[in-house]
Amino acid sequence: MRDDGTFDDHHGLGGSADRSDDTHSTVRSTGSLEPAAPRRFPFGFLRTRFGDAANPLAPRPGRTKLAVATGAVCCLGLLGVSQVGADAVDGSATPAPSEEVAQRAAADAASRGLTRETPAAPTPTPAASTPTPVASTANPDTTPATKKPKPKPKPKRIVPVAGLDQDQMDNAKAIVQAGRDMGVPRRGLIIAVATAMQESNLYNYASGVLPESQNYPHQAIGWDHDSVGLFQQRPSSGWGAVRDLMQPAYATRQFLTALVQIPGWQNMALTDAAQAVQVSAFPWAYAQHEWRATEVVDAILN
């Protein structure tokens, strides 16, 4: 029994701490086990319990403190839950920096994995105004220049020697070139040039008797029967047509062809070899031109 005249509440908050040493226990640690006597409840105890049930609004100091503490704990719990919920809402709206970086990295990886399409070139819009000319940025030092076609080389004109003029020297050159094409040796070339010096003075003659010969390039006109060209060959004697004999190269081939057919012509005197071909009225006249013909041929060959 308490000091205020009430009984101890064995089922209350106090528990075994509110019991006195006189309270009987079911089992004593006395070393002997004896059956406990049946517990008896006093009448006052029952009255107190029934009275509490009948009047639940009666003041109970211990339970009041318990209710206040419980209410405070509940309020603190609700405040904490509301704070956590607010943090959760804010957290969902603003992702953490690490999550944002991860999302950007994933987006970049996805964009790199896709096949990139080449953007279409914009369609140029024709300008209404006249375009301003733009200066060329090409480097003239490195830009290859357009190659111009090389002009055909002009025939080299040999300086006249042995008292000849340029027309005479050109005709002598034509004789030497035709003989070389035929494979005639130097001795035959000298005989041919010396013969032309005696017959035409190295000018290409037309004939006043053959008006046809004057239709072709010529440098002089002669009247010795129908003789034409550098070697004064007569078409009537079978040397060839007029148009052919007026060409220095053709006339030279006709003369050299007849010369090489003479047996031993290379060992003969120049005048004798020339006379054997030309059958002239002045057979000794060819010898006087040998030294000049030699000088002219050497100048052309060298």
Image (cartoon, rainbow, N blue to C red):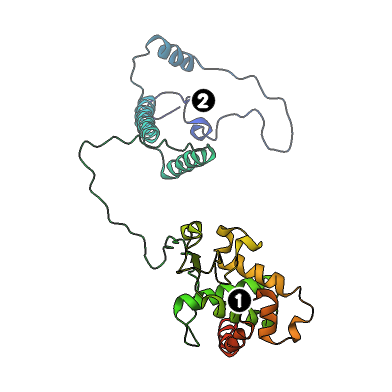
Question: Which quadrant is home to the N terminus?
Answer: top left
Residue 176 point in image, percent of width and height: 60, 76
Residue 240 point in image, percent of width and height: 63, 60
Do labels 2 and 1 touch, CB within 8 Å? no
Residue 220 point in image, percent of width and height: 45, 69
- The numbered disc on residue 176 is 1
**Position of 124 compared to 201: left or right?**
left
Q: Residue 69's quadrant in the figure?
A: top left
Q: Secondary structure at mark 2?
A: loop
In this view, 79 is above or below 192: above
**Position of 49 compared to 251: left or right?**
left
- Residue at 58% from the left image edge and 89% from the top image edge: 288
- Residue at 34% from the left image edge and 16% from the top image edge: 58
Q: Could you say which is closer to the camera, residue 225 or residue 302?
A: 225
Q: Could you say which is closer to the camera, residue 75 or residue 91?
A: 91
Is tag 2's residue or tag 1's residue first in the polypeptide sequence? 2
Graded by Cα atoms within 10 Å as few (under 14), some (14 to 19) or many (20 or more), the crowding at tag 1 reads many
Residue that carries the numbered disc 2 in the rendered image: 10
Q: Amino acid at mark 2?
A: His
- Residue at 55% from the left image edge and 58% from the top image edge: 243
